[in-house]
Every structure is written in C-alpha cells, then in structure tokens.
Amino acid sequence: MSFISWIKNTFETKRSKAEREVKERKTREREKALEMIEQGIRAWNNWREENPDIKPNLSGIDLSSKNLNGINLSNALLVQTNFSLSELKRANLKNADLTEANLKSANLTDADLRGIKLDTLLIGPKLDSANFTGANLSGTDLKRLHFGYVSFNNANLSGANLSEARFWETSLTNANLSNADFTYADFRKADLTKANLIGAKNLTVELLSEAKCLYGAHLDSNLEEPMKRVHPHLFR
C-alpha cells in the first residue's frame, strides 16, 4: 500500500468512526428524550436545564390532547409531532423545528414561538383553530402559511415574514403586526380590530379591503386615509 493510500484509508476510517459516534450519540439522546417526556413537565424542564446543549428529538410522536403548559421545547426537533388539542400555554418553542407538525386546535397562548420552523405552504387542518393568543412570533418566517379560524389576539408578530400568508377568518385583535411583510397576503374576513400595522411592508388598500374589521386599527397615514374614504364601514 502506498503512503498516499494509507493516509486516505486512515482518514476514511477516522471519518467513519466519527460519523458512527455522532449517530450513536443522537440515538442515545433520542431515547433519553422519549424517556424524560413520559416523566412529566417538571422532570422534563429540569432535564433541559441541566442539559442545555441537547436539542431533543421528539419527532413523530403523539402528544395530542396533553397538558404541556410551560414546557421547554426550545431548539427541539418536532418534525411530524402531533400536538392537536394539546395545551401549550406559556410553552417555550423558540427555534423549534415544527415541520409537518399537527397544531390543529392546540392552545399556544403566551407561548414563545420566535424562530420556529413551520412548513412552507402548510395547507389544510394542521393549523386550523390553533390559539396563538399573546404568543411571541416576532421576526419569524411564516411565509405562505395558511391560518384558518386561528386566534392571534394580542400576539406579537412584529417584523415577521407574512408574505403570501392566508389569514382566512382569523382573529388578529390587538395584535402587533408592525413592520411585518405582507406581500400578497390574504386577509379574507380577518378581524384586525385595534391591530398595530404601523410600518407594515407591502400592505395595500386592496389587501386590507378583504378584512372583516379594522376598528381602532393603527395604520400608516398613506393607508388610513384612503381606507377610511373607500371602506369606511370597516372602521365602525
């Protein structure tokens, strides 16, 4: 064997060993996460606090109809996890990967959802009737998501990317939508009562005309004046 071949084989062996060790570590962490979630919220949160560098993998498991109030799921891998009908009030989901997760009718009141990853073009029942009241989604990428009958009352969506998002019959009462991007958004029958839309990007009279209510909403003057002139009924 030539010296160059020996070097190459040694490198490949070390790389394979490193990859195997990473895979084994992730498997152990997955098994530990599944074990801890069964022990309740207090035990889970204590474990997370003691192991801040672990990004727990709870992908694909059924957590529907459970009381998960106050749980720390920050940075967690939650791909295809079922949270339907679950209580997630005050939960920490910051930077969690919720790709293909089921949040139908989940209660996320006052949850921290900054930086979460959701499906692009998430259509259908997975977000229907979810409750994001008071949730923090500031700066989050929610492009092309479809929200049907969802509550964002008192939620913080400031600076969020909401381009091409659909807010069909969604309640955004008193929501902070300042500086959010609404390129081609759809507000069909959305309730924007007292919502803060100051500094919103690519928001137009045409888009807002689809809303159900704009009573008490805060708009930039270039939108407020024509909206009140052309669609005064929306402000009553």
Image: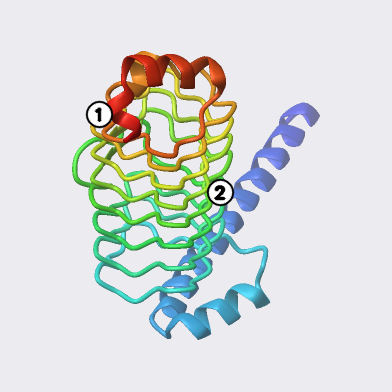
Query: 185 or 77: nearer the eye?
Result: 185
The answer to whether residue 98 is visible is yes
Where is 70 relative to 174, above or below? below
Query: 227 or 141: nearer the eye?
Result: 227
Residue at (42% x, 84% y) in the render: 40
Tell me the mark number nearer the camera, choosing from 2 and 1. 1
Which residue is labeled 1 in the image?
188
Q: Quadrant of the N terminus?
A: top right
Q: Is residue 30 left or right of residue 189?
A: right
Where is 203 relative to 98, above or below? above
> Mark 2 packing: few (<14 Cα in 10 Å), some, or many (20+)?
many
Q: Secondary structure at mark 2?
A: loop
**CB within 8 Å, label 2 to label 1:** no
Asked which quadrant contains residue 108, the reply is bottom left
Which residue is labeled 2 in the image?
114
Asked which quadrant contains residue 204, the reply is top left
Residue at (32% x, 45% y) in the render: 171
> Mark 1 packing: few (<14 Cα in 10 Å), some, or many (20+)?
some
Considering every residue shown, the one lying at the far right of the view is 3
* Kind of residue indicated by mark 1: Arg
Where is 194 relative to 233, above or below? below
Q: Quadrant of the C terminus?
A: top left
- Quick one: label 2 or label 1, which is nearer the N terminus? 2
Q: Is residue 70 left or right of residue 193?
A: right
**Residue 90: % across, % down:** 49, 68
Marks 2 and 1, how far apart at CA: 25 Å
Residue at (53% x, 63% y) in the render: 92
**Residue 234: % across, % down:** 31, 30
Residue at (53% x, 57% y) in the render: 112
* Kind of residue indicated by mark 2: Arg
